[in-house]
Image (cartoon, rainbow, N blue to C red):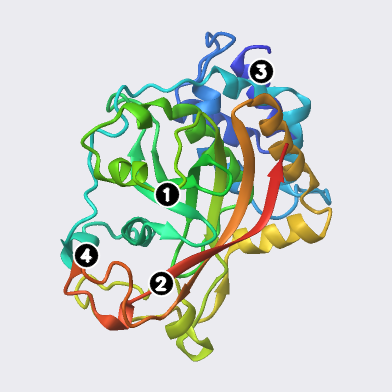
């Protein structure tokens, strides 16, 4: 591969967004002296604005995301991800106890996606998805690292592998592209040392995992993109179907709804991936990722669903939680791309 400055610029050139290349280069410190094998591109590319572009390249019928996916494959940029290695010596030093918690603790962050991740962790076993044993798993070794956190880590009992789960959720409908989701999940997979699961002690989630019927430590994993189908207005049945009735920091037990029903970007693109050739380059990218990773079994696209119940699994784990907000989560795999 040629140096990062030249190779990366090709991607931006092909979608006619060269100015975005300059922004990306400045944000993540890429310089002309970056040598072959640098990890800066692969570690940060999923965060580039262009990865989340929708619509068509100016003067073309080609989708931005399809051109980017095709370029990553054809110009062999996908090989850059092979240079990524885990940096953090202890991913599971931070224990997430599956015990009682006051609803106030769920309001520390305004990011509803993080709150939903906690609720899935509290439920533990998610039918159609697997067993969730950790959330917000850290990847960075120092404050200066640009690495993020894995939304959810799970174990797929049926396929005997760990699940690196990228959760996408916004009460008003998530707008991130599947291209971003796949690249983010793949980047995190490269930065997590799954061998630490076997040796970790003092982490409640992992200790419960080891008691799970059918569990056996493995070096194999899958990528899972987990998303909402739609966020419904109250008149469209939001009280029964919405993944989470938005938590107002000042009125934590009062349900609220979007002003109109919105279908998530991931669900719309997944339907195109399944039913048309519109997303053929995205499928090819998934296949290329699997081809170069011997321990990666599959990539699953999964829709998360909820039903209103009188006794949610986390009912006794969150003090002051209103019954109006209780949910039981389950999942449905819409598409699996495997080797």
Q: Nearer the viewer, mark 3 or mark 1?
A: 1
Q: Which quarter of the picture shows residue 69?
A: top right
Q: Which residue is mark 3?
A: 6
Q: Residue 63: x percent and y percent?
A: 75, 49
- Precedes in sequence: disc 1 or disc 4: 1
Quadrant of the snapshot with the N terminus: top right
Q: Which mark is residue 317?
A: 4
- Precedes in sequence: disc 4 or disc 2: 4
Measure how far apart labels 3 and 4 are at the Cα level: 53 Å
Q: Is residue 212 visible?
A: yes
Measure how far apart labels 1 and 2 are at the Cα level: 21 Å
Q: Which residue is mark 2?
A: 328
Q: Is residue 140 visible?
A: no
Q: Residue 171: x percent and y percent?
A: 43, 69
Q: Which element type, helix, strand or loop, lies under badge 2? A: strand
Toward the viewer: 165 or 36? 165
Q: Residue 26: x percent and y percent?
A: 47, 27
Q: Which element type, helix, strand or loop, lies under badge 1? A: loop
Q: Which element type, helix, strand or loop, lies under badge 3? A: helix
130 in relation to 33, above or below: below
Measure how far apart labels 3 and 2 are at the Cα level: 50 Å
Q: Which residue is mark 1?
A: 213
Measure how far apart labels 1 and 4 are at the Cα level: 23 Å
- Residue plotted at (67% across, 33% down): 290
Toward the viewer: 196 or 13? 196
């Amino acid at each position: 591969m040629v140096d990062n400055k030249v190779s990366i610029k090709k991607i931006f050139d092909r979608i006619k967004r060269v100015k975005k290349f300059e922004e990306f280069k400045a944000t993540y410190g890429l310089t002309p002296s970056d040598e072959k094998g640098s990890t800066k591109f692969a570690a940060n590319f999923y965060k580039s604005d262009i990865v989340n572009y929708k619509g068509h390249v100016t003067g073309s019928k080609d989708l931005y995301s399809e051109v980017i996916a095709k370029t990553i494959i054809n110009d062999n940029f996908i090989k850059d991800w092979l240079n990524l290695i885990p940096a953090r010596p202890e991913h599971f030093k931070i224990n997430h106890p599956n015990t009682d918690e006051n609803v106030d603790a769920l309001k520390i962050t305004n990011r509803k996606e993080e709150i939903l991740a906690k609720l899935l962790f509290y439920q533990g076993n998610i039918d159609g998805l697997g067993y969730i044993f950790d959330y917000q798993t850290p990847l960075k070794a120092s404050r200066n690292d640009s690495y993020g956190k894995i939304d959810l880590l799970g174990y797929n009992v049926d396929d005997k592998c760990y699940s690196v789960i990228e959760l996408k959720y916004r009460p008003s409908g998530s707008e991130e592209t599947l291209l971003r989701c796949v690249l983010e999940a793949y980047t995190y997979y490269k930065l997590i040392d799954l061998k630490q699961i076997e040796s970790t002690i003092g982490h409640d989630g992992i200790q419960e995992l080891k008691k799970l019927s059918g569990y056996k430590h493995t070096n194999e994993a899958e990528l899972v993109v987990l998303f909402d189908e739609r966020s419904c207005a109250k008149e469209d049945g939001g009280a029964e179907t919405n993944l989470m009735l938005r938590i107002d920091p000042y009125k934590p037990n009062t349900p609220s709804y979007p002003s109109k029903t919105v279908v998530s970007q991931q669900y719309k693109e997944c339907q195109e991936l399944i039913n048309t050739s519109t997303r053929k380059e995205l499928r090819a990218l998934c296949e290329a990722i699997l081809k170069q990773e011997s321990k990666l079994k599959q990539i699953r696209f999964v829709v998360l669903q909820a039903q209103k119940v009188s006794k949610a699994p986390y009912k006794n784990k969150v003090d002051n939680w209103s019954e109006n907000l209780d949910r039981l989560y389950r999942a449905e795999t819409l598409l699996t791309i495997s080797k």
